[in-house]
Image (cartoon, rainbow, N blue to C red):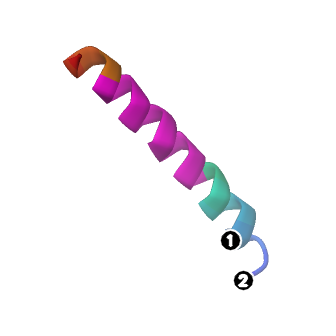
Amino acid sequence: MPLSQPKLANFARLIRQIQNLALNINN
């Protein structure tokens, strides 16, 4: 599954950004 690898990395980065956004809203 070579096509799935970069998609997973992009998804992880997206989750990081969403988590940072949630933290900013909570603070």
Q: Position of residue 8 (x, y in %)?
A: 61, 62
- Please tell me whether residue 2 belongs to the stretch shown in magenta: no
What is the distance, in whole Å, between disc 1 and disc 2 at their CAs?
A: 5 Å
Which residue is at 39% across, 24% downward? Answer: 21
Tell me which amino acid carries mark 2: Met
What kind of element bears circle 2? loop
Q: Which residue is mark 1?
A: 4
**What predominant SS class does the magenta segment belong to?**
helix
Name which residue lies at 76% across and 71% down. 3
Q: Quadrant of the C terminus?
A: top left
User: In the figure, 15 relative to 17: above or below?
Assistant: below
Seen as rendered, the residue at the extreme bottom is 1
Q: Are marks 1 and 2 in contact (CB under 8 Å)?
A: yes
- Tell me: 2 left or right of 8: right
Range of the magenta residues? 11-23
Mark 2 packing: few (<14 Cα in 10 Å), some, or many (20+)? Answer: few
User: Crowding at label 1, few (<14), some or many (≥20) Cα neighbours within 10 Å?
Assistant: few
Labelled disc at residue 1? 2
